[in-house]
Image (cartoon, helix red, strand yellow):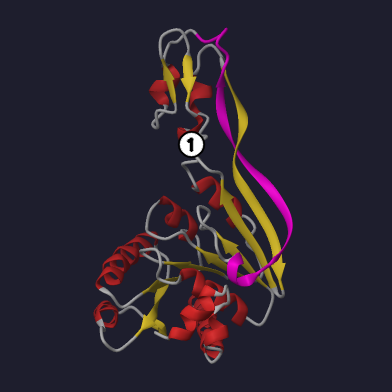
């Protein structure tokens, strides 16, 4: 099962929930940190790092001796990553989406491709948790190719916990679009509700089954509960507002260090999701 943990906004507790799920599974689990601009699952899992791989994507290279500046390459590029300025074309690697269209459009065969590094994959292990994170190089604008590289490490026959980037942009969509189930983590505030609504629309558009976890739950504002009830959205867990959670978080310790009683709740939730997916397959 590929279980993605997402949210409409940052700071709701995606990583807190992702780490707690991984530690509660009670079996070998793959933890994939796809928040490649700021991966922080390692701060709480403390994996022993054993390998680092460079991730590169193909970008065009122009042979100025062959290029006649016709502009066919820039006409086909939707992202202005290659521009003809008269005598020859100029490439902007940071804008390139590695589609290869310019190379095929060039009538002079003046364009080839070379590999351009965009980030790293870091592998490690923490007990039963196999850990993989992507780290985007500084200055690289597009995270999606690196996210795809992280997701390729997902196990085919076990549980993969996928920590998604915040928000509902391309990075989040790339992360959750083929997940078996999506958990949307939110908080009971007007901002949390506003961004949860956007996240719900996103996963519905992608056709992914999903449910909600309310973090920092208290009784003073039930706006998220009311919305979920009106929309028929399941709330699988409410993590209480508790100072102990903030204290252990500041020390780089996981949620279960503060509230160990939640471990059984996470285990029941995982079992319920797996059973629901099996029932859907059989039905």
Quickly name the residue at label 1.
97
Percent x, y for residue 176?
47, 61
- Quadrant the N terminus occupies: bottom right
Q: Examine the rendered structure and indicate whether residue 34 appears above or below residue 266.
A: above
| Badge 1 element | loop
Mark 1 neighbour density, 10 Å: few (under 14) some (14–19) many (20 or more)? some
Left or right of residue 96, residue 222 in this image: left
Magenta stretch: residue 52 in it? yes
Q: Examine the rendered structure and indicate whether residue 72 appears above or below residue 155.
A: above
Q: Please indicate, yes or no, whether residue 40 appears anywhere in the rendered image.
A: yes
Q: Please indicate, yes or no, whether residue 181 appears anywhere in the rendered image.
A: no
Percent x, y for residue 88?
48, 11
Q: Examine the rendered structure and indicate whether residue 110 appears above or below residue 145.
A: above
The total of numbered circles placed on residues is 1
Percent x, y for residue 90?
47, 19
Percent x, y for residue 111?
56, 19
Q: Residue furthest bottom?
A: 261
Magenta stretch: residue 54 in it? yes
Which stretch did the figure color magenta? Answer: 42-67
Q: Residue at x 50, y 52 (%)?
A: 37
Q: Residue at x 41, y 25 (%)?
A: 76
Work out whether residue 154 or residue 88 is closer to the camera in this orientation and state it. 88
Q: Quadrant of residue 198?
A: bottom left
Left or right of residue 114, residue 15 in this image: left
Q: Residue at x 54, y 92 (%)?
A: 261
């Amino acid at each position: 099962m590929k279980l993605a943990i997402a949210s409409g906004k940052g700071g709701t507790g995606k990583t807190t929930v992702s780490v707690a799920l991984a530690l509660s599974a009670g079996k070998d689990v793959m933890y994939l940190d796809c928040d490649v601009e700021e991966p922080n699952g390692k701060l709480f899992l403390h994996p022993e790092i054993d390998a680092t791989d460079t991730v590169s994507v193909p970008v065009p290279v122009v042979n100025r001796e062959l290029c006649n500046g016709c502009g066919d390459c820039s006409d086909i590029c939707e992202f202005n990553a290659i521009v003809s300025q008269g005598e020859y074309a100029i490439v902007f690697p940071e804008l390139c989406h590695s589609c290869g269209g310019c190379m095929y459009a060039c009538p002079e065969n003046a364009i080839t491709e070379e590999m351009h590094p965009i980030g790293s994959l870091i592998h490690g292990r923490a007990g039963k948790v196999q850990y993989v994170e992507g780290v985007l190089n500084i200055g690289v604008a597009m995270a999606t190719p690196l996210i795809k590289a992280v997701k390729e490490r997902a196990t085919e026959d076990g549980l993969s916990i996928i920590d998604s980037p915040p928000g509902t942009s391309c990075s989040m969509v790339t992360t959750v679009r083929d997940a078996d189930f999506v958990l949307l983590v939110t908080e009971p505030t007007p901002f949390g509700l506003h961004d949860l609504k956007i996240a719900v629309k996103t996963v519905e558009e992608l056709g992914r089954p999903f449910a909600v976890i309310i973090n920092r739950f208290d009784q003073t504002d039930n706006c998220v509960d009311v919305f979920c009830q009106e929309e028929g959205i399941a709330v699988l867990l409410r993590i209480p507002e508790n100072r102990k959670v903030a204290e252990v978080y500041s020390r780089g310790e996981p949620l279960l260090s503060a509230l160990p009683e939640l471990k059984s709740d996470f285990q029941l939730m995982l079992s319920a999701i797996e059973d629901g997916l099996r029932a859907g397959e059989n039905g």
